[in-house]
Every structure is written in C-alpha cells, then in structure tokens.
Image (cartoon, rainbow, N blue to C red):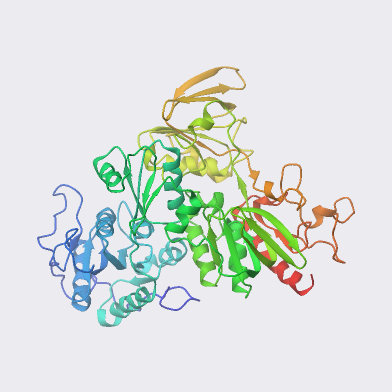
Amino acid sequence: MPVTGPDGPPRPAESGGPPRAAGSGGPPRPAESGGPPRAAGSGGPPRAAESGGMPRPAGSGGPPRTAIVTVDDDPGVSRAVARDLRRRYGETHRIIRAESGGAALDALSQLKLRGDLVAVILADYRMPQMNGIEFLERAMDVYPGARRVLLTAYADTGAAIDAINIIDLDHYLLKPWDPPEEKLYPVVDAMLEAWLASDHRPVPETKVVGHRWSARSSGVREFLARNQVPYRWYSADEPEGRRLLAAAGSDGRALPVVITADGEVLVEPADAELAGKVGLATTPSKDFYDLIVIGGGPAGLGAAVYGASEGLRTVLVERTATGGQAGQSSRIENYLGFPDGVSGAQLTDRARRQAARFGAEVLTARDVVGLEVNGSARGVRFADGSRVDAHTVILATGVSYRQLAAPGVAELTGRGVFYGSTLTEAAACAGQDVFIVGGANSAGQAAVYLSRHARSVTLLVRGPSLEASMSYYLIQQIAGIPSISVRTCTDVVAADGGDHLERLTLRDSVAGTTQTVHAQLLFVFIGAAPLTDWLDGVVARDERGFVLAGPDLSADGHLPAGWWPDRPPYHLETSVPGVFVAGDARAESAKRVASAVGEGAMAVMLVHRYLEKP
C-alpha cells in the first residue's frame, strides 16, 4: 500500500535543490558485482549484477535471502542507487541492480526459479525500449507482492501519478534523493515494513505433466493460470516430464498428471478436485449468509465488494475462476480510470483481493445446479448435493461463448480450437498463423494481443464490417497493425486435423466460394449464451434464457405469477422476491464491464432495501 496510507496517492520525496547527474551525493562508485559492469556496445544485453556477492546457485541450501532490485539505464545512477542501498541494507538483503528492463526481468525470473524472495523493486521511469512503468507492470507477473517504487524526474510526476492506477504503484521518488538518510531510506524502510506485514512467503509450485495437444492438459493449465496458482508445465515427451511421470508411477497414458506442492499425485483431475488440492477455497465456512453471489465476473465481484464492505455476510460462488469473460481479456482500454488500459487478469486480481479484504468468502470450482425458496431463506444447491442458504441471492452468472457449429470443431476443442483467449496459449502463437472468429470487442482485443506473438492474425467476421459490433478505438488499432487482416462475410464451415487442428475450411458468404487454409490455432469469440439453464422453472427468463428483472417482469401490466409482496419488484429483482440479477445474465443489459460492476453495486443497494422491507 502507498506509504501515505490507504486513502491517498504516494507522495513524491521532497528532493529540493538542483538535480545531480548521478542521483545521490558525490561521484558514483562501482558496485561490487563480482566483476566490472559490461560496457555499452560490448555485445549482448546488459546483465543484472548482484552487489552482495554472486547469485546463490540452485540447490545450494540455506534459507532464501530477500532481495531489493533496482533498474536504471544510466550506469552511474544505477551504481549510485545500489551503493546507497548497500550501505543501509547490504547486511540483511541482497542488492541486485540492472541497467535495462529486460535484464531486470531476466534476473527476477532467475530469482523466482530459485525460490528467492523480492521485497522491493525500484525502477527509473525514463528507460529506452521499456520504460519504468512497463517494466514494473511485467515485474508484477513474476513478483506480484513486491513493493514497487518509481524513480522520476520532476517533469515526470504526471506519469508517476498515472502509474498508481496502471501498476498499483506504492511510491514514486524524485531524483536526486540526496541525502539518502532523509529521502531514500525512509521510503525503502516503509516499503520493507509493508512487505513484511503482507503474505510474502513463496508458494511452492505445482507441477503439471501433459501433452501439448491434450484437451484436458490445456484445461488444467488454464484453470491454474486463471486462479493464479503457481505451476510449472512439463511436456510428457521431454526427459524431465518422463522423469516426473516415472516418479509418480504413471505410464503416461492418462494425462495430465498433476503433482501438488506437497507431492500428491492427481491423474486427470476434475476442476473441483484440483481446486481443493492446490489451496483454493471450495467449502463455505457458514451454513447461512446474508448474501450469496453466484458468479465471479465483474458484476459478481462488484456485488461481493460492496456487499462485504457494507457489513453483509457475503459468499461468492464461482464454478471455474473469477473474472468471467472480462478476466480473459488481454487489455481493457475503455474502463474508467485506466487511461493506459488494464488487463482482465489484473483487474480481476485487484477486485478479488478487495472483496477478500472486506471479508467476503470466494469459493472456486463449485457448480450451482439449483435455486430453492424456503420461507424467508433462499437456498443454493451444488452439484455434489450440498447446499448453502442466505437471506438474499444475486445472480451474476454472466454468459459463455456460443459453440461453433462446424464439423470437426467439437473434436478439436482444446487441441487447437479454443473458446476465449486462453492465458496459456499466447506463447504457442509465436511464429504461427492464428485465426479468430468474432467481430466484437473481445475478438478485437485478442487480435491485438496475439499479434505481438503470431506471424499473422486473421479475424473471421460473419458480417460485412466491424463497425456494427466493435468499438471505434479497437477498429483503429487493428487497422494500424500490419500483421492483422480482417475477412468479412466469412464463416468457418469445417475444421480438420489429426491429434490437433491442422486445417480450416472457410466460406465466403457473398461469393459462395470455399477455401482451405493451414491453421494450428483457432480462437472463437461468438455469441453470448446466458448460463441460466439451471434456473428453468424457478426464475422468469426471456426466450433466449436471459433473466427478466424489475420493470421487464410487468411489461404487460401484471405482476409475475406467484409474486407475494405488496410492492412491485425492485429494479434488478427477479420473479423470486429476494433474488436479484446483475450483469450480462440480465435481459437487455449493456454487456460492458463498467455497467456490470455498476449493476453489482446497485443490486447490493436493493438487497439492503429488501432486507429492510421484504
């Protein structure tokens, strides 16, 4: 958290006086890095240097030492920062410096592999190729718990303030920081104290051994990634994968094999079994709550945050992973307050942590199959036969992508055909020709993201243009990326391959012609099918399955059948009193992240109104 407390942005250090070239007082001295720094242009990227001795080799034993990492492209400033940090913290911490964002990311990856801890990361804002904000955003993926400090010149304070939203910046520090006893050390002391107060312990990795084109292997990796469970992937065809299979007593015929952090072996585990073994909460701690939220997308997370923060005993139930479709988005650029965009995973993680901080329980891998009314209680029944009850329920189940009805697609799903933009398949797009079906924002965001890795990206759109279904800003971005092409009036009519997708047959609906193209990866973003079949006969829905609420229930001038309160339904209340709906599952909803979050908050307000007067 920012050192100024939870309610304000980080303050710049009062640096005073003219800037000095090297950053702190006096001329910079070389860092004790076990060798001279690499000169510019000496070949290869600059490497990170450790000022407290050479890096500890893997398997060398002994407790991991906590590191402070600093990165600045100016060698003099880099050495000055490391020198001042070593003077104060060198006895208790490893001080690691780098002269580029890439070198620092390599160093962080090596530390992660060795199981070492990183408490604080300091990065200069003005670096070529990758500025400090971009570096810290990527560093969050490696060490999300490390405290982040941005070093800036006075002219860059605006960018530093923007970074508070982009990377949850903990502090920004103006250069120069002389004397460090007044300007640098108090900031780092506060960062270390905040880090020590958090749950900074390294989480042992889960190991997954599987086949590249195994649908269930892909599903397990996606489940772990979306739930932010650390894991390492091993191909069953590689030596280390075979060694792990042998150690697990598996012949490799049934994949994937998951080896948990404590050594337990799971063969082709279902999501519910896997969740319970990797530390995700799956069982409610109480039998009765004030509020049950079903679905962990933006609407559900919004409801959980507002419900718990306002004192309601709240439990959120999610069948796969929080975030919903938005959580799979590589970059959401039109969400209020994030001028540089935010990834769906980061937005989801922040919302989930926020809900937990207010006391909401979050259950994962629990499939809800029934809704029951028992007097004043509303009961939710799970697939395993267990149940939980509450005064009120908010339905935030969202929507799923519609299945692509073409021969061969179902058989190749998870083996080259994927619904949504899977977190684990982006790296596999390197050098590939990727195809995306869909013409809405989710498809456009995926195209922009995957174009960074793929040789080419082709958007296959049924309609005559993107204008009717995609936001203008995305259309402009796509037009400016040479590797993305758009084929309108095009349908996928067949998918073919052996153990994975190899070919697609495309039909031009205007010309009536077909074409077969080579393809290993197809991502599908079509339609919006509400996940409400389990509500059939209990809650009123429209002809497409979306839940009716509020005024839509009495469009013909009559209250819904069985309605007993002496009032009309509240705005987001369904045909069952005390059961509300928010987000994409509601009929005629806006299908936008911001509106879903707003509906989640509004539903909680109406829950309070219902509790006061059922």
Relative to 297, residue 507 above or below: above
Question: Residue 201: x and y, percent?
Answer: 34, 68
Relative to 25, residue 593 above or below: above
In the rendered picture of this protein, how many numbered marks are placed on residues?
Answer: 0
Quarter of the rendering containing residue 206:
bottom left
The residue under the point 41% across, 29% down is 499
- Quick one: 455 or 291, which is closer to the camera? 291
Query: In the picture provided, is 383 more to the left or to the right than 450?
Result: right
For the question of whether residue 311 can be seen, the reply is yes
Quarter of the rendering containing residue 545:
top right
Question: Residue 538: x and y, percent?
Answer: 76, 53
Residue at the far bottom: name it: 182
Residue at the far front: name it: 249
Residue at the far right: name it: 557
Query: In the picture provided, is 82 more to the left or to the right than 588?
Result: left
Question: Residue 400: x and y, percent?
Answer: 60, 44
Query: In the picture provided, is 607 more to the left or to the right than 510?
Result: right
Relative to 315, residue 488 above or below: above
Query: In the picture provided, is 204 more to the left or to the right than 478?
Result: left
For the question of whether residue 301 can be seen, the reply is no
- Quick one: 573 or 150, which is closer to the camera? 573
Quarter of the rendering containing residue 74:
bottom left
